[in-house]
Image (spheres, grey):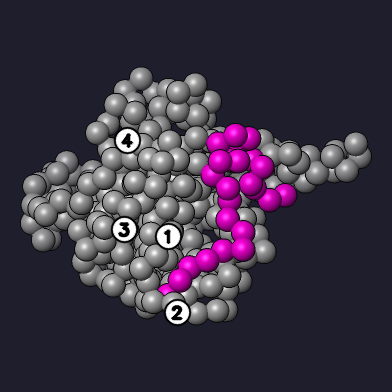
């Protein structure tokens, strides 16, 4: 009883630290430290600016968690929080940081890849924070926005945003959408510099397989979909078949030929990585703005299970056809069936 009280007190203290960090940001400096508690697999925690120094000290710098088995194998990159309101992607990334232990290869995870987007909330109809109950007490996670904070961007939105490689002109706010500006620019807006830093990490670390975890409104065509760069569509097709056998129905699309700036397109085209984007249905992204956690049809636990199962299925497909020294294997990996059954809280550290 006393231990539980002390743990609850400690949890409250950590939450206060997170809130204070959020409430009093120094201008132009990344001050949010999300409540991420690395597990035994994590061998190093870095900042993204290590791969692109000019990002240091900006609100876009963000933590990078590396779990290196020390044994040759594939390097796998996982990003959550490209859109910081797509909470199932963020929490899937956090669960991997806290519970995954690779036995061959490396796992590189950025749970809040657009840190600036997580510092603000676009709508009063969605929560600013969400609470996840664990067996040892509650944990709190920021529910952010789709776009980089306009204050951080450092320049007004253009009337229309057009990607340098061409294509359709989009609404001006899309200039602050990380998933429209890849590969970014070293001297561009904050969002373009962030994209550039991510590309630099993918190239420098010779990432083999890269995942960008998203959510969409349940009515969206994208909900429950894997989007794959055309060069690695076969791996996604194999994964969709094995997911189907597990009772998880995922649609599959290749990256558009004409739509530039998206992770699965530019990561796959400009680096050697096989690139995938995974989408689950988030009720809070519908026009009705449902509950992002406790929806009866699309509960958060089920959406995190879908992300983890999809990653696992794609990695299994990769392992079937890769050279022996490029396998990625784990001694521990969050079990998606258990996440679905008991919730993600059981897969978070204390
Ligand atoms: Zn998204």
Earlier residue among tags 4 and 1:
4
Determine the residue positioned at 36% across, 37% down.
249
Determine the residue positioned at 69% across, 39% down.
134
Q: Residues within 10 Å of mark 1 (few under 14, many from 20)?
A: many
Earlier residue among tags 1 and 3:
3
Q: Is residue 339 above or below residue 76?
A: above
User: Mark 1 to mark 3: distance in Å?
Assistant: 9 Å
Q: Which residue is mark 2?
A: 325
Q: Which quarter shows the N terminus?
A: top right
Q: Judge left or right: residue 349 versus residue 92.
A: right
| Residue 164 is a magenta residue | no
Q: Where on the picture, by quarter, is residue 266?
A: bottom left
Q: Of tags 4 and 2, which is closer to the observer?
A: 2
Earlier residue among tags 1 and 2:
1
Q: Which residue is mark 4?
A: 223
Q: Nearer the viewer, residue 132 or 141?
A: 132
Q: Which residue is mark 3?
A: 235
Report the disc number at residue 109.
none
Query: In this view of the protein, can residue 53 be seen by the observer?
Result: no
Query: Do callouts 4 and 2 mark residues in contact (Cβ within 8 Å)?
Result: no
- Residues in magenta, as a range: 326-350
Determine the residue positioned at 60% across, 41% down.
338
């Amino acid at each position: 009883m006393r231990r539980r009280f002390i743990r609850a007190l400690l949890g409250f203290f950590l939450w206060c630290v997170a809130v204070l960090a959020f409430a009093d940001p120094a201008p132009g400096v990344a001050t949010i430290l999300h409540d991420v508690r690395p597990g035994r697999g994590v061998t190093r925690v870095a900042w993204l600016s290590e791969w692109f120094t000019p990002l240091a000290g900006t609100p876009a710098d963000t933590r990078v968690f590396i779990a290196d088995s020390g044994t040759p194998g594939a390097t796998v990159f996982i990003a959550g929080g490209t859109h910081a309101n797509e909470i199932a992607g963020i929490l899937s990334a956090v669960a991997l940081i806290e519970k995954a232990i690779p036995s061959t290869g490396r796992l590189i995870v950025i749970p809040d890849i657009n840190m600036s987007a997580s510092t603000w909330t676009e709508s009063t109809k969605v929560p600013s924070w969400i609470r996840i109950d664990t067996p040892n007490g509650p944990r709190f996670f920021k529910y952010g926005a789709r776009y980089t904070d306009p204050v951080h961007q450092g320049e007004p939105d253009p009337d229309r945003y057009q990607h340098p490689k061409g294509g359709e002109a989009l609404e001006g706010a899309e200039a602050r959408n990380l998933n429209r500006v890849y590969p970014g620019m070293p001297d561009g807006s904050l969002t373009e510099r962030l994209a550039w830093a991510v590309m630099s990490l993918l190239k420098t670390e010779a990432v083999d397989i890269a995942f960008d975890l998203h959510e969409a409104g349940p009515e969206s065509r994208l909900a429950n979909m894997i989007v794959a760069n055309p060069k690695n569509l076969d791996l996604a097709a194999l994964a969709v078949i094995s997911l189907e056998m597990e009772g998880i129905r995922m649609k599959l699309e290749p990256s558009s030929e004409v739509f530039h700036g998206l992770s699965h397109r530019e990561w796959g085209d400009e680096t050697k990585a096989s690139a995938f984007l995974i989408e689950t249905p988030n009720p809070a992204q519908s026009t009705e703005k449902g509950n992002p956690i406790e929806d009866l049809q699309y509960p958060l636990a089920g959406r995190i299970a879908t992300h983890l199962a999809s990653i696992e299925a794609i990695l299994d497909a990769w392992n079937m056809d890769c050279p022996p020294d490029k396998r990625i294997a784990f001694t521990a990996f969050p079990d998606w069936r258990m996440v679905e059954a008991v919730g993600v809280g059981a897969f978070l550290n204390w």
